[in-house]
Amino acid sequence: MDIRAILLIGGIGAGEQTRPESFGAVPLACLDVLGMSPEERVISRLRHFGVSVCSVICDAPATAEPFLKCAALDSGDQHLHVDGEQFWRSAEETFHQCAEDGAEIVIVIRMGPYVEADYEEIIQHHFDRRNSVTQAVDADGASLDLFVLSTSARSDAAELFQSRLQHMRHESEAFPVSGYVNRLQKAADLRRLATDGLLGRNEVKPQGKEVKPGIWLGPAARVHRKARVVAPAYIGPHAHVRASALITRGTVIEHHAEVDCGTVVENTTLLPFSCLGAGLDAMHCVVGFRRLAHLVRDVEVEIHDGKLVGMVPLSPVSRLAGSTAALFAFLPRELYRGVRASFGRKARKRTAEPSEEAKTSPETPVLEEPLSNSGPSEFPPNLAVMRRYGDH
Amino acid sequence: METTSRPVVVKRMPEKMNLKQARKFLQEVQPFVNSDRPQIVFDMSQVRHIDAAGVDVLLQCMRAAVKHDGDLKLAALSPQSAVVLELTRTGRLFEIYDNSTAAVKSFSSFLPNAMRQFEPHGMQAAAPVQPISVNNEDQQGSGLAA
C-alpha cells in the first residue's frame, strides 16, 4: 500500500506581528530539541511506519529560512517554503499530486502539536470504520491536527484544507491517541519537550554520546575542564562551554551554541547558534535569536546586547574568520600585557630597593611618590597586587 | 552507557553540621575524596542543622572529588538541608537523589525517575505520559507517569 504524508508547519496566524507556535519567527517544530527538530523526528517516525514519501510545507518568514532545513528528507521528498495565503492552497495541491501519483492513503499532520502516535493503529482504525477522513484526538477529545485521508475522497480533502483543518465534510469517529503529546504552542512547551526527553518520558532521545550517566555530548562539542556539567544535560555538536561555567538541572545546549566563562545555566534551553555571555545566571528560560523567554515569569524579552545574548555566525566561513580574527587580536594583547607586567615587576623591584640617599637618611619616606618613569599607575605603588584574576 | 565496577562510598552526614562537626566530618571523608576517581554519596537524611561551614565542606569535597576525576552526589535530603542548599544556591552543583540506593546506582546508569524534580512550578510533564518500556517490571513499578 502506498502511504504518503504531508507535514504542514505553521499555517495559523500568518501575517501577524508575532506568530503563534514560533520563537524568534522560527516555527517551534523546526527548532532542534536534543539535537533533532520535532519535524525531523516526526518524519523519521513516519518512515518507521512505512510512509514512502513525505512532503513538507512550511509557513515562515524569509528571515527564518536558514533554520528550516530538514535533514530527514530524502531525494524523493518535497520541501516547500510558502509564506502567507498560499499555504493552504499548496497543501491541497500537494494532496492532489499524491492522489495522481497513486497513493491510497495520505497522512496530514500540522505542527503545531508534537504527537507520538502509532500510525499503524490510526490507519487500521481508518479502514475498520470505513472513514474517508479520520481525525486524531487527545485523551480529552481535543483535535491534534493529525488526519488520515483516503485519496478517493477528494472533496472531503478539499473541504478540510479550505477550512484550515477546522471542519470535516462528514462526521467520523475520531481516533484517540494514547502516546505522548506536546502542543508546542510556546517556548515553555519546547522546554518541556526537552526535559521530558532527558527524563525518558517520551521518545525524544538525545542525539549524541552518553559520556557519563545522564550527560550527552554531540560530536565536536567542547567542554572546558574547569566547567561543571551536572546530569541530566545535553551539549550538542560544535557547542562550546567555557571555563568555570555550570551546566545543570536538565540544561540543553544545542549545536554551535556557546556558554561563556563563569555563566550558570540551570534548567534552560540554549537554541542553535546562540551565545550566552560571561558571568550570567540563566535559569528556567529558553535563549536564542537574541531573545530570552523566561518560563516562570512567562515573559519574552528581546536583548540586543551581544555581551548578554548574542548569535554565532551561521556560515562556517564567517565563524572561521571570526575565530581567526579573535586569535590575532588576542595574541598581541597578551604579548603587550606580558611585557607591561614584566616592566611593572622591574619597576616595583627598583622601588623596593632603597636608594643611596634613602639608606643614608632613614626618615625619608621611600614609597611616598609614584615613580615618574612608570607612568600613570592603576594601583598605588605601595600596594602589592597578588592576584587580579583568580587562578587564571 | 558502560557500567563501572569501582566501589561507591556512602557516607551518612551527622545531625548537626556546624563548624566543629563539619571539620570532623571533613577529616573523616578526606581519604575517600582524595582517592583515585572517587565515587561518593552523602546521605543527608539525618541532617537537622546545617550552616555555612557545612555547605563549605560539601563544596570542598565536591571540588576534591572532581579534581580526582570522580564525583560526589547527594541523597535523601532532609527538608532542613534542602532549604539551606536552595538558599545558598549550591544544590544545583550536585546531582540529588531521593535515596542512597538510587544515588549509588546512578554512577553506573542514568536514573531520571530517582532524581529530585528540578522543574519550576507549572512545568509538569505534558499529558498523557506513559511508560516507554512496558516489558521491564522495574520501570513499571517505578512509574514514569508524573
Image (cartoon, rainbow, N blue to C red):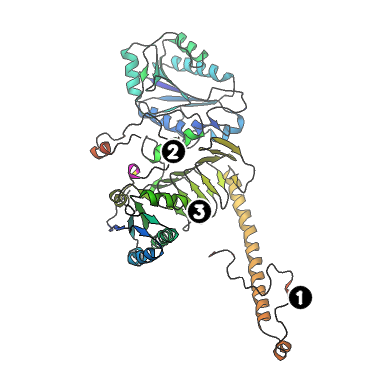
User: Hey, which quadrant is residue B47 in on the image?
Assistant: bottom left
Q: Is residue A91 above or below residue A274?
A: above
Q: Earlier in the sequence, mark 1 or mark 3?
A: 3
Q: Position of residue A59 (x, y in %)?
A: 55, 25
Q: CA distance from mark 2 to mark 3?
A: 21 Å
Chain letter of mark 3 equals: A
Front residue of A33/A372: it is: A372
**Lateral position of residue A53 relative to residue A18, left or right:** left
Residue picked out by circle 1: A372
Q: Amino acid at mark 1?
A: Ser
Chain letter of mark 1 equals: A
Q: Quadrant of the N terminus of chain A?
A: top left
Residue ID at (40%, 57%): B50
The reply to whether dot 2 and dot 3 touch (C-beta < 8 Å) is no
Q: Main secondary structure of the magenta part?
A: loop
Q: Position of residue A289 (x, y in %)?
A: 58, 39
User: Hey, which quadrant is residue A114 in on the image?
Assistant: top left
Residue picked out by circle 2: A194
Residue picked out by circle 3: A245
Packing grade of label 1 (10 A; few <14, some 14-19, many >=20) is: few
Picture disc at residue A166: none
Q: Which residues are magenta?
A: B112-121
**Can you tell which of label 2 and label 1 is closer to the viewer?**
1
Q: CA distance from mark 2 to mark 1?
A: 61 Å
Q: Amino acid at mark 3?
A: Ala
Q: Earlier in the sequence, mark 2 or mark 1?
A: 2
Determine if residue B72 is in view: yes
Residue ID at (74%, 88%): A357
